[in-house]
Amino acid sequence: MAGARVIPRRIGHRAKGASAPRILDTPSPVGHGGLVTENAATMGRRLDLDWIRVTAFGLLILYHVGLVYGPYDWHIQSVHTFGWMAEGVLVTNPWRLTLLFLVSGAALRFMTLRRTAGQVARARAERLVPPLIFGMLILVPIQSWIEAMDKGSWSTGFLAWWWHEFSPSGLMNGVPTNHLWFVVYIAAYSAVAVWLMRNPERLERMETALAHHLRGWRVLAVPVVYLIAIRVLLFPLFGITNKLTWDFYNHFLSLGAFLFGFLMVRQEGLWRDLERYRWIGVGAAAIALPIMMMQTAHPGGGAFLGVPRAVVFGIDQWAVISAILGFGSLYLRRADGPVLRYLTDAVFTCYLAHQTILVAAVWLIRPLNLPVVAEVAALVVATFGGSLLIYEAVRRVPVIRPIWGLKPTPPPTGPRVPYLRRRRLLWVGVAAPLLALAAVLIAVLTYPGFDHARQYLSELGGASAPIPAIFNLGVLIAGAMTALAGIGFGLAILALAQARFVGTMTAVVFVLAGTGLVLSSLYPWPDPRHMAINLGLGIQLAPVLILWGIWARSDLRRLKLFLAVVFVLMAFLTVMTKHLVLPGTVNDANVGWWERAYAIVLVGWVGVAAFLLERRLAGQAGLAVEPPTN
């Protein structure tokens, strides 16, 4: 199809950066703190470009969901496929990525107004390199593992796949980047811009020359001629590989757009002309799009060496971009608000997460055999919602902000909030049991005939489960959260009672429990290594340790009573399920219900205790604490 060439590849052995066709797009990770212009004529934020970036990301999610239903080889497909998607993707495919490169270049130009070339280079490296490394080591392997499992070329666990990818033999094929190829290109193009910055006089001459040669109607005509020329001359020879070292058409297109944005963004004359000709862009795009679709659908659409198709493609490409820039400049330059500020900060994190979430969502939801409308809605909600949930989580944890593309937490400008980090860790403890419960409920819904009386919960993640990844992933995340919460419990005991030894032992017990849960999810039952979950049984000592630590606090009577009851319940359930008394009471006909009761007490108490301790810390810090409501 026009502009979306599918590149054949072997799972896990892709040319790095060439693992997917050009149909992969991404929002710009550049300048997501807001675009600020220092041009005297446009003093203030360039909010129109922020809106363009955020909107393009929304389109990106819908676009990638659409690829799940397309007639070509994407990472994972739905059982529902539609041939007309080959033409449908042309609504945004020719221009969206080029527009995002342009906006990225514009954002970088504003950064250069406040920094030297060396400072810009360092800022780009700090923003782009950590998420790129994290994404290639964690996020991309999850995608490729699911793809390999789905297509039948791999049948074992994720850890074995990860080693397969990053073993010496795997690295001979390079490091897969999947959707993160865009970050690689932005880093390389930023280096070009930094090089231009080293000669400010030359840079100003280039900006002036660009504004001069694109005055008036030429702001429409000259870019169209350029786009058609490279489409005719370079695309047939090189195609699109998304491989930095051999992607010459793509570089003439995307680097050209990046530098165009970099050089033109401060030239007010160009923006006035874009505003003036915005409706011409709309009209040209309205004519070009149906012609382009017919050329794709008709067997003779590539006649005359594909030149007519390239002409229409180039016209549509710039017509849409110029119209978007013109309307945005005219109406959105001052359209500020909390929604824009929130989404502008979230967009890079959501970009990093969204494709992994989508691939996993398709893998988990597809077996439910939902009607296509319901399946599409579920994938859209899962991808949007999952991406924003990850952003909400990581932006609150300073140590992981950089690997998710967020700036380090700025130093507080007001009075320091006491115990803030400890309280955040305790909130992780509140969330962990809820996440585990959600994973169990969803896994049960996907397991027809699951017998709660006779079957163990671990069977939801075993070989007999239809979608074991739901349970195992939920347990893995809940285990990691439990370990973090344990650190919060230990620090809370230290803050409330100065009991350093007890606080340390409490944290150790929780960390061991979290480690056991993580290992049990990586090695599902009946793998013998699944029994690492027994590390989690030490958490039964945690209520006694916390009770010991806070015993001298007279203002924590309810918490102390709760911990004592929890310990007694866990002791009773342990005695019963180990058949130490009343043998035969727990049997094959009801063992599942006993296990459920044990799990609820063993895990659920953590959330309640974490909540009560967090409220006590907030009260001790002198913060307003609202009483809990029913």
Image: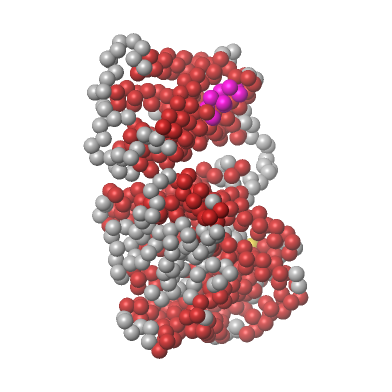
Q: Is residue 438 visible?
A: no
**222 with respect to 21 (left or right):** right
Please give the range of residues in magenta: 503-511
Residue 26 location, x and y as percent? 50, 62
67 w.r.t. 240: above or below: above
**225 with respect to 153 (left or right):** right
Residue shown at 43%/29% (left/top)?
A: 531
In the image, 123 versus 611, the foreground residue is 123
Q: Residue furthest top?
A: 581
Q: Quadrant of the N terminus?
A: bottom left
Q: Is residue 508 magenta?
A: yes
In the image, 399 versus 146, the foreground residue is 146
173 w.r.t. 329: above or below: above
Residue 319 location, x and y as percent? 47, 78
In the image, 542 versus 305, the foreground residue is 305
Q: Quadrant of the C terminus?
A: top left
Q: How is the image coloured?
A: secondary structure
In the image, 287 versus 519, the foreground residue is 519
Total marks in image: 0
Residue shown at 48%/26% (left/top)?
A: 535
Residue shown at 57%/30% (left/top)?
A: 487
Q: Main secondary structure of the magenta part?
A: helix
Residue shown at 33%/44% (left/top)?
A: 467
45 w.r.t. 266: above or below: above
Residue 113 location, x and y as percent? 71, 65
Q: Residue furthest bottom?
A: 304
Q: Is residue 26 magenta?
A: no
Q: Residue furthest front?
A: 169
Image-quadrant location for residue 329? bottom right
Q: Is residue 458 visible?
A: yes
